[in-house]
Image: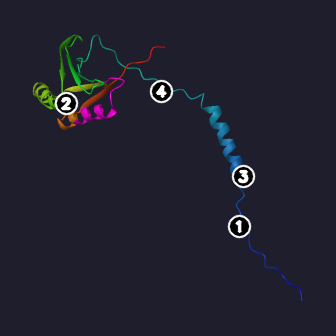
Amino acid sequence: MALHKKRRPVHEINVVPYVDVMLVLLVIFMVTAPLVTPAVIDLPTVDKASAPRVVPLEIFVKSDQGLVVRQRDARGGVVNEQSLSRAQLAGFIKSVRAKNQDVSVLIGGDKNARYEAVLQVMDELRKQGVQKVGLQVKTAQQ
C-alpha cells in the first residue's frame, strides 16, 4: 500500500516580467524627461500698471502678553501706534472695520511671547470678522 500525497496546486504569480517592463519604462522616462521643454508663457506688458498697495494693520504680541497696534499710511510711514489690552482689542477692531470692511492684519509675536497669546489674538480677529490675517516673521541673516 503506497501512500500518495495529494499535490496542492501552487498559485504563484511570476513577477519577473513585470519588473522587466517597469525597468524599461523607468529608463524611457529618465531619457525623455530632460528632452521635454516646459511651456514658456509670454505675458503681455503694459506701461505702468500697479495695484494699489494694501497696508495691513499690525498687531504685536509682547512677551508680557500686552498688545501694540500699529497703523501705517500707503508709503509705509507709521500713522498711529498704541498699546492695548486684550479687552480693548475687540473695540479697536470694530472701529477699524467701520472705516474699512476689508482690513488685513499682520500679527507679530515677540520671541518669548506665548503661542497661546498669539492664537487668542487670531481668535479675536476671527470673531470680529477679519478675513485676511497673516503672521509676521523676521528673516534670518545669513
Identify the coloring. rainbow
Q: Considering only order in the chain, which callout, 1 or 2, is on the residue closer to the N terminus?
A: 1
Where is mark 2, residue-wise?
86
Q: Which residue is mark 4?
A: 39
Q: Give percent across and percent down for residue 78.
A: 21, 12
Q: Residue furthest bottom?
A: 1
Q: Are marks 3 and 2 in contact (CB under 8 Å)?
A: no
Image marks 2 and 4: residues in contact by CB distance under 8 Å:
no
Quarter holding residue 28: top right
On the image, the x and y values in percent for residue 93 come to 15, 28
Give the mark nearest the N terminus, 3 or 1: 1
Q: Which disc number belongs to residue 17?
A: 3
First-in-chain label (3 vs 2): 3
Question: Closer to us: mark 4 or mark 3?
Answer: 3
Segment tinted magenta in the rendering = 109-123
Query: Which residue in the protein does label 1 denote?
Result: 11
Which class describes the residues within 10 Å of circle 2: few (<14), some (14-19), or many (20+)?
some
Q: Residue 139: which quarter of the image?
A: top left
**Nearest to N terminus: mark 2 or mark 4:** 4
- Disc 4 or 1, which lies upstream in sequence? 1
Extreme residue in the right direction: 1
Q: Amino acid at mark 1?
A: His
